Image (cartoon, rainbow, N blue to C red):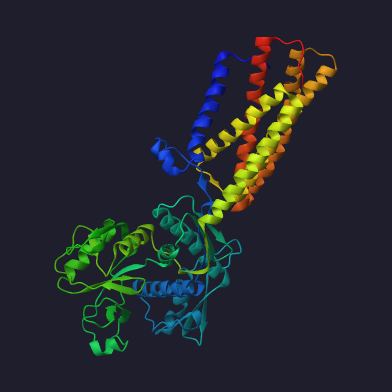
Amino acid sequence: MLDFPRWKVLWIWGLLALGVFFAIPSLMPEATARQIGLGGFPRINLGLDLSGGSHLLLEADVADLTRQNLQKMEDTVRTEMRRGEPKIAIGDISTSGGRLSFFVRDVAQLDATVERLRTLTQPTGLSGQRDWNVQVVDSTRVVMTPTQAGLAAATDSAMQVATEVVRKRIDELGTREPTIVREGRSRILVQVPGLQDPAALKQLLGKTAKLEFKLVAIDADPNEVAQGRAPAGAQVLPYPDNPGGVPVIAVQRRVVISGDDLIDAQLTKDDNQRPAVSIKFNSTGGRKFARVTQENTGKPFAMILDNSVLSAPNINEPILGGNAIINGNFTTESANQLAIALRSGKLPVALKVIEERTVGPQLGADSIRAGVVASVIASVAVIVFMLVTYGRFGVYANAAVVLNIFVILAVMAALGATLTLPGIAGFVLTIGTAVDANVLINERIREERRRGRGVVQSVELGYKEASRTIFEANTVHAISGLIMLFLGSGPVKGFAVVLLIGIATSVFTAVTFTRMLAAGWLKRRRPTEIHI
């Protein structure tokens, strides 16, 4: 137990030296770390409650998602009736009342229509219930109604995608350690440390980023369009930057190409050196774009974002490279935000901010100051107690406590962990409990000495016999920490992270490191008595 070969001693000291070195950048301001050449080393990220930042609670517009599902099913039904074999003639599809309904012109095809529509529905969950009910009403009218199970499944799927899209957009901003988690059925919690002005964040997250290209309805009467009326097959959309002065424009309903085929979007400059967004399509989108521009050269087409027209230029020549530039009344910031939104993908459902809080950096500074004071008091109290109670072995324990603090910081920095206010509480708790192992060991050494054993044998048995108890106690602590880590969120998870790291490092410093120091002292001095 007390045999430490030279390689093992060097390995332990080297590991602790690395811990101290990698902890140093986290103990000084980032600017100072850069000045002394440590700016590129990992640092501990501070949570929202320590560094300040923005807290947003987003809620999905479930009604908007329901409308989207109705629109998708309407398009699917039209396509299936038109392209399927045999073709089935149907009347206009109504979406009033949150359901689809239409007449089948040939009553003999009614059963075939129902069977074909049922193939378009999907089972949800384990119950076997489908996402749409298909019924025949009044002998010739077919009605499709979304089920509650179908709506719930669609909402869950949309929220999963929305959470990832929000995560990508925030990561593109270059922020550190944002917290992005779902809350309940239709909400997303967003916390971004260090961001004091949430306006840009809200604007970015509020963009659905649904990009569409549609041909302009050139046969529309401008007077009718100005009054919000469009010819059949067209629709009127807002056009705030219309050079003609009228803030609306008529475009065809059919989408010639959508943002689903985008693979990249970047901030750029147009021919007049104004901010713009360059976009690049995948091979499928590039072919569609080339075909549309070839077939409609000389005609205007509209670039539409979230049902608002950004620009409607003429197609002067075919665009064959799969690249295009979106113009508009952009600033550099707004163009960059649009590029980020397009790169990260469109939101499957509109999100609105229902709760907003901003944590000032001064509050975080006060929390850090209080945490540092608490840590210092805890450390001093532990050091004094161990010195008075255990003498030399108390010095070893104190050295282990100090090194344990550095190693915890180094491990947190290496893992990219975020330190929160509860994390500081876990840190202080770890300092207080870091000497538990040494107390057990030292008391066991005392007990062996009282039994009349020699110094070396008492120290060896003290470490050996106490190790089992130390392992069991820390295993229980670790299990509790793991439960908090996997089942908790936010502050609870921050506390668990620090606690688990502290458990692992304290066992190493309090047992292995102090045993090495004790073994070295016994080997050099060979004492006949110890005061413990």
Q: Is residue 73 left or right of residue 300?
A: right
- Foreground of the two, 410 or 264: 410
Residue 211 in percent (x, y) is at 33, 67
Name the quadrant containing residue 512.
top right
Q: Is residue 389 above or below residue 458?
A: below
Name the quadrant containing residue 526.
top right
Residue 173 in percent (x, y) is at 40, 55
- Foreground of the two, 51 or 408: 51
Residue 443 in percent (x, y) is at 78, 26
- Residue sitting at 62 percent across and 37 percent down? 502
Report whether residue 253 is seen: yes
- Foreground of the two, 353 or 142: 353
Q: Quadrant of the N terminus?
A: top right
Q: Is residue 347 above or below residue 495?
A: below
- Foreground of the two, 422 or 105: 422
Report whether residue 496 is seen: no
Q: Quadrant of the C terminus?
A: top right
Q: Is residue 356 left or right of residue 251?
A: right
- Residue sitting at 33 percent across and 74 percent down? 308
Residue 367 in percent (x, y) is at 59, 51
Q: Seen from this angle, which residue lies furthest right?
A: 451
